[in-house]
Amino acid sequence: MALVVQKYGGSSVDSTERIRAVARRVADTRRAGHEVVVVVSAMGDTTDDLLELAGRVAAEPLARELDMLLSSGERVSNSLLAMALEDLGLRACSLSGDQAGMITTGAHGRARITEVRPRRVREELARGAVVLVAGFQGVHLPTGDVTTLGRGGSDATAVALAAALKADVCEIYTDVDGVLTADPRIVPNARRLDRLSYEEMLELAASGAKVLMSRCVEYARRNGVPLHVRSAYGGEQGTTVFGSVEEQTVEQALITGVAHDRSVAKVVVAGLPDRPGFASAVFRVLADQQIELDVVVQNVCTQPGRTDLTFTVSEQDGPAAVAALLARRGELSLRDVLYEEHVGKVSLVGAGMRAQPGVAATFCEALSSVGINIEIMCTSEIRISVLCKDFQVSDAVRALHDAFQLGGSEQAVVYAGSGR
Amino acid sequence: MALVVQKYGGSSVDSTERIRAVARRVADTRRAGHEVVVVVSAMGDTTDDLLELAGRVAAEPLARELDMLLSSGERVSNSLLAMALEDLGLRACSLSGDQAGMITTGAHGRARITEVRPRRVREELARGAVVLVAGFQGVHLPTGDVTTLGRGGSDATAVALAAALKADVCEIYTDVDGVLTADPRIVPNARRLDRLSYEEMLELAASGAKVLMSRCVEYARRNGVPLHVRSAYGGEQGTTVFGSVEEQTVEQALITGVAHDRSVAKVVVAGLPDRPGFASAVFRVLADQQIELDVVVQNVCTQPGRTDLTFTVSEQDGPAAVAALLARRGELSLRDVLYEEHVGKVSLVGAGMRAQPGVAATFCEALSSVGINIEIMCTSEIRISVLCKDFQVSDAVRALHDAFQLGGSEQAVVYAGSGR
């Protein structure tokens, strides 16, 4: 008998029919003798609908009240799934984030889980019930205020619960068959990966793969929770994420996959004094604005004693980053700030590339063969990322996928929609 | 500066426009210098919509899960109203029933408030915020399970909060101008009452007046909370409910109003042994089924040593009442159980009728003048109720309203819909 945590995204529960289908799947697992904890997102478009209502009553809805509003969505899906399970003859009990002991920071809209107190969850499991926990939400102590966890919040709920309960596995049910070698909308023969290490999954997630959020993978890695990414609509295999690169290298393919991200923007801080302290001052300005940096590279500048600092941020943060830097132009002694939104990031990830000097060469050859000029290149031990024009992203992904022979013989199965 | 508790029903908040209108009204009260606590119901048809979803996933949804589901409705209306208030420049804070300290019994779907612990409400008031409390819901300790209060639950929340906070007044905003002398859909010149005693309001509520539920009035009476029933859409006066019949008799009209209830059904337990213990055995059978009795009368039976016991219950409970009694037929030694659903109850209420022997005569003359036969009659000190055929209810109400000259000179204002 295993203890299994299952997470279902919003598209898996976007109608009462789908809720009943999820209930049948949960019931199968329970009847196979396992203890089951289920984390559900809000039904389909609930979150967007609620946000629209908020927009109609207030120009700038307060984050605290938005969290109270949005947290209602998971209560609905959660209790409906409990009813559907009881209807199948199982015991079930739905719990809010608060009741399940998901303690978080007080940062409304982007709270972090600080502690899990799953007393009630354990009690209900001991009673033989399937326990349903509202994803995406928690409670801030000592105020008792409801918080939400932001993007990827339900995955975070599931992984944190799995860690606290020492679950055997955390299953993430989604609208794809598992983790694929590339986005199947771009690469039709993208192949499902059977398994990969936390590090590789982290690099893929950071590089734009949408199937799992970095924070969830990182939390699973730190707590040794095996993740199993599976389709909510069938497909028995899925992808298992666990273990470190070192543990897996022997049986590991050279390259794991290609990820891309069109939502990045490039900022060039041109003509920054090439002396200690100036780069860190730039980063401090951005940190003060809560802007997260992605790729950072520093080039030599043609002007003596100056350097060009280039980095990527999300398109959303781009204008604020530029404004913040220009406001400190004099203080930072920089010459100019250049901004480019029409760029995309393409990354190759693979644990096996560490010992393979030829990878970078093949990588660049593949891109140049389809006429793509690399704007920025940046590597980690198990990843190579480049920035190119955004209209070239698909070509780049396909060229890399082919060059490293990642394709399978069958078409990948894709389903529309995505949850939170 | 007063402390005011305001309650708005579901129809007052059934769109974002109406939520903004409620926010402006709340803001006016706050800006007049008062402390304000607001209790809101779920938006319009939310509860029905959620119940429909529940019906689609399970044949018999569990009460605990229904409560989790339904409690989401007030979270939405509550947080939206908070946002609308903040948008008007006020401080606001929405609290769930749990956060506001509404402690209840564990009877899901019909929980009773056992205690109010308004620590957080007081803190937020002290901070200068308008405090919004989700109506209709509470928490059962020590499980921490969400409960709902059943019909009239939001009114109960408001009155209990007003009592716990020692509020100066509890304002119930509804879709009528106040408490009227009769249902204006039947009696176009029904008149708004300026004030009446708790006892009169209790009798009216128990007799079918929908504007306030008995439990709410009874709680207000016990705790001395003045109630002010007002229209949510304008109309500055409303009706004040406070004080006892004794305190108010001097300035009191003879008769307060006419109430009616079409949702009753008549049960006749025929040929019950006319000996001690048999009537109580009948009531025990019904109590064990959680069936509430309304009017009870006992008639002499034509058969010697036997009696007929007649009572009314809600139409909803009728079939279960009959089935339970027939199942114990032998044990109770009763001859038969007769059931009649097409009946209605019409009641005349007035503190002044105590000292007026002519009231009953006028009452019966009025009904007979329009050809209505009285099936059952039952009186209290300040109320006369009769049962008649349901198609005669409207005629009976109009006849009584005229006979006791309760009408005003203007048409009453009515608005559609009603909240919970």
Image (cartoon, coloured by chain):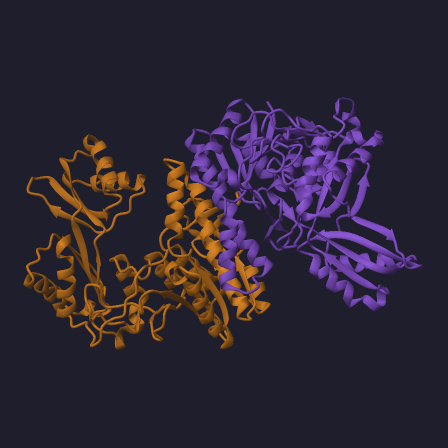
Chain colours: A purple, B orange
- In the displayed structure, B38 sits above or below A116; it is below
- Left or right for B109, reference B264: right
Where residue B318 sits in the image (x, y, percent)?
Answer: 23, 43
Where does the C terminus of chain B fall, quadrant-wise? bottom left
Q: Work out whether residue B227 can be spotted.
A: yes
Q: In this figure, what is the number of numbered marks?
A: 0
Residue under the image location 12 percent in, 56 percent down: B392
Q: Position of residue B88 (x, y in %)?
A: 53, 70
Q: Is residue B154 left or right of residue A394?
A: left
Looking at this view, is B139 or A8 the one in front?
Answer: A8
Q: Residue at x 35, y 56 (%)?
A: B215
Identify the image quadrant of residue B66.
top left
Residue A343 versus residue B81 in the image, above or below: above
Provide residue B307's location: percent of width, then percent of height.
Answer: 13, 42
Residue B98 is at least partly visible in this image: no
Q: Nearer the viewer, residue B241 or A311?
A: A311
Give the vertical position of B407 relative to A196 (above or below): below
- Percent x, y for residue B237? 34, 75
